[in-house]
Each structure stands twice: as structure tokens, then as C-alpha cells.
Image (spheres, helix red, strand yellow):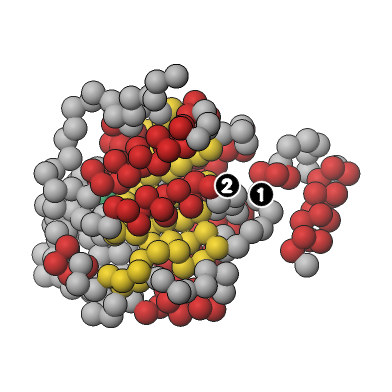
Amino acid sequence: MTPRQLITDAKNTWCPGCGNFTIQHTLKNVLADLEREGTLLDNVVLVSGIGCHAKIADYLNINSFYTLHGRTIPVATGIRLANPGLSVICCCGDGDCYAEGLDHLLFAAKRNIDLTVIVHNNRVYGLTTGQYTPTSPLGFKGKSTPRGTLENPLNPVELMLAAGATYVARGYTKKMDQLRTLFREGISHRGFAFIDVLQICATFFPAADYYTPRVYDLNGHDPSRFEDACMKAREWDYTTDAPIALGTFYRRQSPVFEAHTKGPGPGTAGRDKAVRELLEKRG
Ligand SMILES: Cc1ncc(C[n+]2csc(CCOP(=O)(O)OP(=O)(O)O)c2C)c(N)n1
Ligand SMILES: [Mg+2]
């Protein structure tokens, strides 16, 4: 069998130097690896929101669902619940899932739905030409904040740890090899996998000169220790000059939500049994 041609011939409209190219090619490489190892790519679905990041659904030749801005995760959740045989990958924007879709992100993590969420965190609304997002740094000057934002950014890694995500990582589009490992780990993880990717937006947030000297690899960190993960997550608050840790902050196995959604509906003996089992497993 010849490997699938994974890049479509759709005209690519990302700006030269955009970090989305790195994410696209990294994901392509991981999918090609999986296919070589026997995964049927017809069982993989890519779900995206609306934004520059979301065009990846047009550019990668796998099943995909180009949803609404902010609704990547609920659509992905629906796909996964309807057919738990599918591996569902979400490519979200920071505007998409830290602003309009934040509640969906939190609840999917809380439920431990088996999704892989890759956030193209360029820290700006790219498609709509440069407004601030929840991760833009304090003082960020954009189209909607010409004198600078007055808000502190959210720390998505910390937020996801608090929400109950069972795999939490951060990558950087200038570190492609590591990104490949993180995507691979996230897709292989059974449960809610979250990867915040510091993505260069060449036009509205060209932050490579800020990130590159500060990033370091989380070598020697034990991702099974929640408290250590929280400490590492708080080291850099998306604004200060602290070192920026990249890699896997946290990983744990826990029952996935969809394992208990098949069969008899709520209030029945089947559902009661499922709840009992979950409580037992969680101690
Ligand atoms: C429901 C809805 N709200 C808002 C918009 C307008 N809108 C389209 S893209 C976008 C911002 C995209 O930013 P982000 O999710 O960070 O993606 P990026 O373009 O940076 O990749 C907004 C606000 C929309 N199309 N639909
Ligand atoms: Mg963005």
C-alpha cells in the first residue's frame, strides 16, 4: 500500500514564516508514522475552528470538520461520543478555545473525553488581523488595543491542570522535533490530551526573538507528579522574563467519559453500574 498523500493541493494562504506550517508538517509526519505502523487513517478525524489555524483542515488530506469559531471542542466531543472508534484531533486557535470556546475546553478536560487538543497559540486573533486574545501579554498593542491591553494573560497550562486534563504539554513551532514527540504522545494518550503550542504569527505577533532564548526542555521532570507540574506551569506566566518550559508537564491514566456513555440511558441499572465503577476506579 502506498502512503497516503497527506498534503492537499488546496492553495495555502498562510503568511510566509507562519508557525502553522510547522504544526501542519509535524502533524503530517506523525500521521504518516502512525499509518506506517498500521493505523488506518480513515479512523482519524481532524476538527478545527475558524481562524488562520483552522485552514489546516483544508490543507491536510484526512477526514475533517471545519466547525464554527469557538466550537471545535463540542463538535469533536460529539464525534467521539457518536463513534468512540475514531481518533479525534482538534486544531484550535487561542481565540477559538481560550476565549469564545473556553467553557467547552474546560468541560472536555473535566470529563476526560479522549481527544487530542492542539492549540495554535499565536496569542493573537490572526485571521481578523491582530486583536488581543486571552493569552496576549499585558500591554499588547493590537487593532483593538492600540494603547496596550490592561489585562494579564491566562496561563493555559495551569488552567488545564486545574480542570483535570490527563495529558498536558507545551511545544514551540521553532522546536519541530520536540513537537513531533508531543503530538505523538498526545494522540497515543487515552483521555484528554492538551498541547499548547507557542506558534509564531509572522505578521501580528512575531515573538521568536522573545521565545527562543528563553525556552528549555523539561528534561528530568517527572510528569506523574501533579504538584511539580503545577510549579513548572507557574514558572512562566506568559508575560514575565522567566524561562519557558517546553515538554510534557503532566500525564496520568484515568477512566474516559465515553467508556460509560454507551448502552442503557440515565437512571437505568446500566448507568448506575457505570457510576459505581467510576467511583471505585477513582478511589
Ligand atoms: C461565532 C464567531 N465569533 C467570532 C467570529 C469572528 N472571528 C473569526 S476568526 C476570529 C479570531 C481567530 O483567532 P484565533 O482563534 O486565535 O485563530 P488564528 O486566526 O489566530 O489562528 C474571530 C474572532 C466568527 N467568525 N464566529
Ligand atoms: Mg490566534
Where, quadrant-wise, is the C terminus in this rendering? bottom right
Q: Is mark 2 within 8 Å of ligand 1?
A: no
Residue contact between numbered discs 1 and 2, judged by CB atoms under 8 Å: yes
Residue 254 image offset from top left, x and y in percent: 66, 58
**Residue furthest out toward the top:** 1
Asked which quadrant contains residue 156, the reply is bottom left
Relative to 23, is 212 above or below? below
The percent position of residue 42, horizontal first and vertical second, equals 49, 26
Q: Is residue 180 above or below residue 163?
A: above
Q: Earlier in the sequence, mark 1 or mark 2?
A: 2
Quadrant assignment for the N terminus: top left
Under mark 2, the amino acid is Asp
- 10 Å neighbourhood of mark 2: few (<14), some, or many (≥20)? many
At a point 46% along the width and 32% down the height, the residue shown is 35
Rate crowding at label 1 as few (under 14), some (14 to 19) or many (20 or more) other CA atoms within 10 Å.
some
In the image, 45 versus 93, the foreground residue is: 45
Element on which disc 1 rests: helix
Q: Amino acid at mark 1?
A: Phe
Image depth: mark 1 or mark 2 in front: 2
The residue identified by callout 2 is 114
Residue at position x 48%, y 61% in the image: 168
As measured in the structure, the alpha-carbon distance from the residue carrying label 1 to the one carrying label 2 is 8 Å
Q: Is residue 258 left or right of residue 62?
A: right
Asked whether, in this view, residue 80 is left or right of residue 184, the answer is right
Q: Is residue 122 left or right of residue 245?
A: left
Q: Residue at x 40, y 71 (%)?
A: 218
Q: Secondary structure at mark 2?
A: loop
Answer whether residue 159 is visible to the viewer in this image: no
Left or right for 128, reference 26: left
Q: Mark 1 sits on what residue?
A: 257
Q: Ligand 1 near label 1 (Cβ, under 8 Å)? A: no
